Amino acid sequence: MTVTEQLNSGSMYLICGGIIFVIAVICVIFMIRAWKAGIALGMDKTRMRRAVTSSATFSVLPSVGILLGVLALSGSLGTPWPWLRLSVIGALHYETQVADAAAEQLGVRLGADAMTLPAFSTIALLMSVCIMWGMILSFFFNKRYSARLRRTPKEGKADRGFGDRAMTAMFIGMVSAYVGSYIGAFVSGNGRFTFSGDFTPLIVVAVAALAMAVFTYFSERKGKAWLDNFSIAGSMLIGMLSAVLIG
Amino acid sequence: MERDTYYQQYLRRTHLLGRAVSALCLILLVGAPFLIGLLLGAMPDLGAVARGFVSVGLVWTVSSVVEFLVYTPMLGSGGSYLAFITGNLINMKIPCAMNAKELVGAKSGTAENEVISTLSIATSSLVTILVLALGVMLLIPLQPVLQSPALQPAFANVVPALFGAMAYKYFRKDPKLAAIPLCVMAVLFILAPSLTASTSFMIIPSGAIAILLSYLAFRKGQKEG
């Protein structure tokens, strides 16, 4: 049995699939609890259903993007392990980077050199150890931190009602950082002020934003409120199509 | 009062459940490489893991602390336990939860936001699990389509497409507020293009600028009103 065959064996699928199944069950439990809590708290079922529908449509395209990450890593790590890592806990931009760095420590180049079994198990452990801190922090501090956050608006007079604005502002900051990075990559990607870097992400941002504007127009001005559930996914699809057209 | 009591009890149980499942997932995810090592007859080299952790893991540890501090207020208690277990925060869970919250008009820090955020992240995680499971099952027939050169630019630009759509949605709420962090970030990335490799860290100064400006506008509004 070759290393690749061993990494793609039935037992590997069983271990990784089993863990994914456990986490899927956890998601279902959280979902049912939240739904029941929403009803008990007097929330409108239609609004909760809307949150579920929009989140489902929203997640399809990024998930297909993540599937490509599985494909990219499956050549060197087999399919089951990247499937586990990217289905749960992992992040698309993180996994490849850490797998590469871990391989480097072992003197192996992903995709170029043949994978060995000790190298694989070491890379797999390092990938787990590097990204587990969010869960550890949640375990120890989520309760205390969340309680503190809930207390703040009541105690600080000046801060009353600012929490929601702060979250929106934080999100604006996050989007600004990404859009700013695309501008920087185009203007100075191949040397400062050469304007010869990759412009595709910038075009994609502009097209997706324009598509979102059209969706918003129909939703807000033409009474097509149902479009809201699909507007992000639709705008993303149109933006991604523009990348194909640019080539 | 009864509603408040119920909500407090719900939160207490959420923390209990959240801690239990976080511990379980930690054991499963760290234990899996050892189990696989046992199965394949090749245990992980702990020395190499330690060296690798020093070279790349420390950066991700700092990043995890920042993510925890920034995203927990956005996601609420249940949502953040789930999000830190299921991953893909920046490229999916955060925008997904923000979008759901926006659609139903839930306010941060409220019981409604807690419920909506948990529903949104659980749904999003289940969709990813389903898409990936289907993708892995259909890997052979799907491979030529997903890896066709014509479609590569589309999949390479999922994140710009996501942030483009979200940019319109959020920037139009307060264009003046958005203009300053956007300009500052663009100038920074133009002058120091190497920063593009650390975009996720640049969220911190960018977010801090936006929050500061928003706070100043809020205080001004309070004084005038």
Image (cartoon, helix red, strand yellow):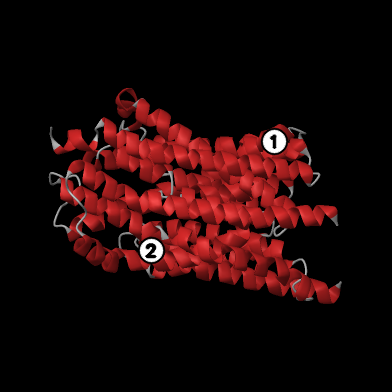
- Residue B197, placed above or below residue B42: below
- Residue B137, placed above or below residue B31: above
Q: Nearer the viewer, residue A137 or B90?
A: A137
What x and y, as percent, mark residue B126? 52, 37
Q: Looking at the image, which residue is at 24% across and 34% down?
A: A8
Q: Looking at the image, which residue is at 56% across and 53% down?
A: B18
> Disc 1 marks which amino acid?
Arg
- Give the spatial CA distance, label 2 vs label 1: 35 Å
Q: Residue furthest top?
A: B141
> Disc 2 marks which amino acid?
Trp
Q: Secondary structure at mark 2?
A: helix
User: Which chain hosts label 1?
Assistant: A
What x and y, as percent, mark residue A220? 75, 40
Residue B131 placement: quadrant: top left
- Total marks placed: 2
Q: Nearer the viewer, residue B45 or B158?
A: B45
- In the figure, is residue A165 to the left or right of A29? right
Q: Looking at the image, which residue is at 69% across and 72% down?
A: B215
What x and y, as percent, mark residue A242? 46, 37
Dot 1 surroundings within 10 Å: few (below 14), some, or many (20 or more)? some
Tell me the quadrant of the picture where the N terminus of chain B can be found: bottom right
- In the figure, is residue B62 to the left or right of A111? right
User: Which chain hosts label 2?
Assistant: B
Tell me the quadrant of the picture where the C terminus of chain B can be found: bottom right
Q: Which residue is identified by label 1? A: A49
Q: Which mark is residue B60?
A: 2
